[in-house]
Amino acid sequence: MIDQKDREILAALQENAMMTSEALGARVHLSPSQAARRRQRLEAQGTITSYRARLDPAQIGLGVQAFVQVQMGTHTPDGARSFKQLLGAIPQIVNAWTLTGEADYLLRVWCADLSALNTLIHDRLLPHPAVARVQSQIVMEQLKQAAALPV
């Protein structure tokens, strides 16, 4: 069970995952040892799945963000499995979702430039035997970064 203190800890860690037990305890009005025990429990039970650094894409040479919709021509288990493996093998694909509606998959991709996006679509995605159609939308401006989950 997750109580209100756990929710406060989760909210604080989503803002700053490197927060010390002392700072976390002060933030949620617990002793450092209580805050550390609760954090360890949330990690052990899988509520906290990992910690990551958020990077500035421009500073690491990623200038184009796009959303790519993929429509499959066939819907066999083998085709879906091999497409999922392909997605895992392409580091430029940072998120992938299955969808209802016309598109079967929505991919969020980061590429160095438009040429790299073109290569990703034409040389990696379209050649897959189960893929029928690919449509991309290039992000002009990101108005809101990935936000913390509402806890």
Image: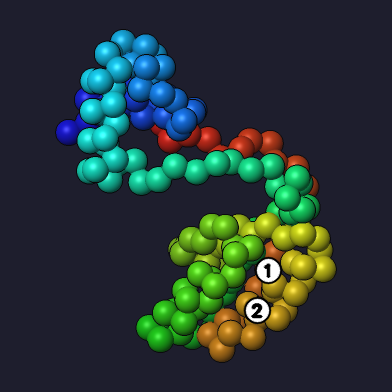
Query: Residue 29: horizontal and vertical position, in percent?
Result: 31, 10
**In this picture, residue 69 sits left or right of residue 76:** right
Residue type (three-letter) at the residue carrying disc 2: Arg
Q: Residue at x 27, y 13 (%)?
A: 31
Q: Residue at x 29, y 31 (%)?
A: 39
CA neighbours of label 2 inside 10 A, class few (<14), some (14 to 19), many (20+): few
Q: Mark 1 = which residue?
A: 135
**In this picture, residue 109 sits left or right of residue 50:** right
Number of numbered discs on residues: 2
Numbered tag placed on residue 124 in the rendering? 2
User: Looking at the rendering, in which quadrant would you find the C terminus?
Assistant: top left
Residue 77 in view here: yes
User: Looking at the rendering, in which quadrant would you find the N terminus?
Assistant: top left
Which dot, 2 or 1, sits closer to the camera?
2
At mark 2, the secondary structure is helix
- Which of the pair 37/95 is nearer the observer? 37
Q: Quadrant of residue 5?
A: top left
Q: Is residue 137 above or below residue 141?
A: below
Whole-angstrom CA distance, mark 2 to mark 1, is 14 Å
**In this picture, residue 138 sits left or right of residue 133:** right
